[in-house]
Image (cartoon, helix red, strand yellow):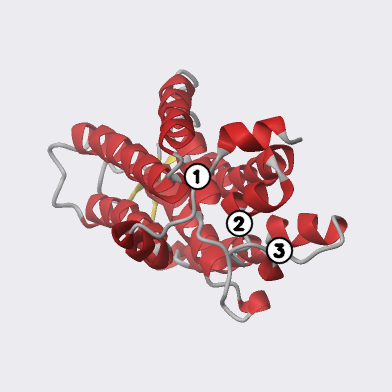
């Protein structure tokens, strides 16, 4: 493994943050809805994201949007892994790729939720965050994909049965982040006070703060019993 000296190569993270932010600003819901001769921001809940696309245009269109957002969140993570998989932070045994892939993903999610191209009013980041987590660990070991897919299937089943799309999505993001946090706590159990390990775990926490914060209105409506139902089974019959 090669040493990565942050004082000499810090600009890599600055460039990555800017590039990933603008990748996040690329909103597929707006593009797909315009192809459908509408603007998703003026339809349904007005949120340019997968759930509103599903409610407004049907399950097939929602699935396409989910796939695109998943790839948007996942590919930068894969790039971060490939760029830094052979490096450790100088003077430590902490893999640069372990930090970098989540750092890349974090800025994609920030760009998705707060896009400068849409006056900082973007989507809620669920699909892209799930894509981030789905790609992150399978980068290093392909069989991790089965755990990720199992969690995603559990989320889908919950949404189908409960019809609470927003809550199911948030539970899914939290479950995925806890799973990956446990992996890194076990991996670096002797270095948990290392700044880079703490930074990695803080990024996982921040991803939850961002997605849950973006859903604050949904949470208020859930508590008040006014949240919109996500009728996946009904949507499937009508397309």
Q: Quadrant of residue 222?
A: bottom left
Q: Earlier in the sequence, mark 2 or mark 1?
A: 2
Q: Is residue 80 visible?
A: no
Residue 135 percent across, percent down from the top left: 51, 36
Q: Residues within 10 Å of mark 2 (few under 14, many from 20)?
A: many
Camera-near label (3 vs 2) is: 3
Image vertical order of residue 72 relative to residue 10, above or below: above
Q: Earlier in the sequence, mark 3 or mark 2?
A: 3
Residue 169 percent across, percent down from the top left: 43, 45
The residue located at (38%, 49%) in the rendering is 99
Whether residues under marks 1 and 3 lie with C-beta atoms below 8 angstroms apart, the answer is no
Residue 31 percent across, percent down from the top left: 78, 59
Label 3: which residue? 40
Q: Residues within 10 Å of mark 1 (few under 14, many from 20)?
A: many
Q: Quadrant of residue 227?
A: bottom left
Label 2: which residue? 49
Q: Which mark is residue 6?
A: none
Image vertical order of residue 48 relative to residue 81, above or below: below
Q: Residues within 10 Å of mark 3 (few under 14, many from 20)?
A: many
Task: Look at the numbered disc 2 and give the secondary structure of its residue.
Answer: loop
Task: Look at the numbered disc 3 and give the secondary structure of its residue.
Answer: helix
Whether residues under marks 3 and 2 lie with C-beta atoms below 8 angstroms apart, the answer is no
Q: Earlier in the sequence, mark 1 or mark 3?
A: 3
Residue 144 percent across, percent down from the top left: 43, 23
Q: Which mark is residue 132?
A: 1
Camera-near label (2 vs 1) is: 2
């Amino acid at each position: 493994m090669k040493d990565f000296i942050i004082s000499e190569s810090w600009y890599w993270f600055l460039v990555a943050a800017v590039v990933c932010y603008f990748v996040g600003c690329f909103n597929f819901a707006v593009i797909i809805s315009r192809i459908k001769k509408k603007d998703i921001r003026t339809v349904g809940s007005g949120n340019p994201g997968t759930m509103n696309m599903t409610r407004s245009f049907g399950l097939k269109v929602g699935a396409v949007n989910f796939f695109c957002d998943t790839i948007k969140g996942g590919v930068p993570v894969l790039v971060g892994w490939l760029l830094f998989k052979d490096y450790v932070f100088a003077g430590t045994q902490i893999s640069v790729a372990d930090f970098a892939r989540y750092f890349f993903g974090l800025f994609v999610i920030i760009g998705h939720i707060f896009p400068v191209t849409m006056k900082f009013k973007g989507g809620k980041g669920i699909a892209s965050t799930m894509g981030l987590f789905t790609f992150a660990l399978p980068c290093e070991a392909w069989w991790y994909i089965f755990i990720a897919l199992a969690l995603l299937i559990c989320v889908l089943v919950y949404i189908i049965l409960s019809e609470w799309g927003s809550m199911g999505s948030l539970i899914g993001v939290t479950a995925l982040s806890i799973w990956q946090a446990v992996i890194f706590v076990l991996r670096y159990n002797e270095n948990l006070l290392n700044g880079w390990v703490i930074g990695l775990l803080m990024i996982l926490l921040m991803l939850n703060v961002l997605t849950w914060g973006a859903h604050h209105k949904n949470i208020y409506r859930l508590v008040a019993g006014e949240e919109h139902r996500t009728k996946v089974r009904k949507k499937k019959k009508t397309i």
